[in-house]
Image (spheres, grey):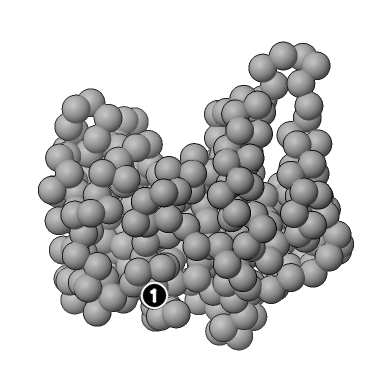
């Protein structure tokens, strides 16, 4: 796996919007906030656009923005503006040789999961499940420190939740493997396509937002029947923000996750604070991960 060089103050961060348009604030506020951390900022065309109401520009423009930022030698890291929807429309439009030949830091989450998966699997590029650019005016110390730790660690990175956020053991045991995954809905959308997630001998990371628990059940069962949970070595369940019961007597989220994990006998933990939450952890995808589910410990190794 190709692991990009580290990020330092004075480097240039390129902003792109491969999914939805900016809906709150404006791009200059985002730029100023990121510059306040000591970085230069280069803004892609898609960050200024809106198309069909829910896309940041047409598909060709958004795909071209990705390629241009990877080709641009002045850009050291690429950060996505926000999620929403749109990356699945780009997967057959991107020249993956460009990404493979010009590896650099790539950061985002949620709908960006589609790009993480193809960059990891097709381009052999390690990427970062981390904060979006549009939240830069609200980055807290923990969130920003987690981003830097993930980008810049040399030998070993131990992941710890923010204070008062407990990690739960769902199924006991230890496992190792390359970390892959992201948003559950986007993972499901790859199944049966040329861009299907490969979980063989991997640690699978899953997060979600705004879904009823029964829908989470349906998607996890889809993964189970597709063999993706049997194939993986372990499961990290991240933040499930605003994932709630449809009826008062529905199962709790943790009960569903325990049931699923017991079906496949895989070490699993729950509530790692990575996903649609703040403070938020940044996780390096495509990097070797060691998980001790019994003792709720996660670390990455170069």
The quarter of the displayed image where residue 118 is located: bottom left
x 17%, y 32%: residue: 51
Q: Position of residue 132 (x, y in %)?
A: 41, 49
x 63%, y 47%: residue: 224
Q: In the picture, which quadrant includes the N terminus?
A: bottom left
Q: Position of residue 178 (x, y in %)?
A: 57, 72
Secondary structure of residue under mark 1: loop
Q: Is 254 positioned to the left or the right of 246 in the image?
A: right
Q: Position of residue 221 (x, y in %)?
A: 63, 40
The quarter of the displayed image where residue 157 is located: bottom right
x 19%, y 76%: residue: 73
Q: Residues within 10 Å of mark 1 (few under 14, many from 20)?
A: some
Q: Is residue 273 visible?
A: no
Q: Is 173 above or below relative to 64? A: below
Q: Is 201 above or below relative to 115? A: below
Q: In the picture, which quadrant includes the C terminus?
A: bottom right
Q: Which residue is mark 1?
A: 124
Q: Is 118 above or below relative to 299? A: above
């Amino acid at each position: 796996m190709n692991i990009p060089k580290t990020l330092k103050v004075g480097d240039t961060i390129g902003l792109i919007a491969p999914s939805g348009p900016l809906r709150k604030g404006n791009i200059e506020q985002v730029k100023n906030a990121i510059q306040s951390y000591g970085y230069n900022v280069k803004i892609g065309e898609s960050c200024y656009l809106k198309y069909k109401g829910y896309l940041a520009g047409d598909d060709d423009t958004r795909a071209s923005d990705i390629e241009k930022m990877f080709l641009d030698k002045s850009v050291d890291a690429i950060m996505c503006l926000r999620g929403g929807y749109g990356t699945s429309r780009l997967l057959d439009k991107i020249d993956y040789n460009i990404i493979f030949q010009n590896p650099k830091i790539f950061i985002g989450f949620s709908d960006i999961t589609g790009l993480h998966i193809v960059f990891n699997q097709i381009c052999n590029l390690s990427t970062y499940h981390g904060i979006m650019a549009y939240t830069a005016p609200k980055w807290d110390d923990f969130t920003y420190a987690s981003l830097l730790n993930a980008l810049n660690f040399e030998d070993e990175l131990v992941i710890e939740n923010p204070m008062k956020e407990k990690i739960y053991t769902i199924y006991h045991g230890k496992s190792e493997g390359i970390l892959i995954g992201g948003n559950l809905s986007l993972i499901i959308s790859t199944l049966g396509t040329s861009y299907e997630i490969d979980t063989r001998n991997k640690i699978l990371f899953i997060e979600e937002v705004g879904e009823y628990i029964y829908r989470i059940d349906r998607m996890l069962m889809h993964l189970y029947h597709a063999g993706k949970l049997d194939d993986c070595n372990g499961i990290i369940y991240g933040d499930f923000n605003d994932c709630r019961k449809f009826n008062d007597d529905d199962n709790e989220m943790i009960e569903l996750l325990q049931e699923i994990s017991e079906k496949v006998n895989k070490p699993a933990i729950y509530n790692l604070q990575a996903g649609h939450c703040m403070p938020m952890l940044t996780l390096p995808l495509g990097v070797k991960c060691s998980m001790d589910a019994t003792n709720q410990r996660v670390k990455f190794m170069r």
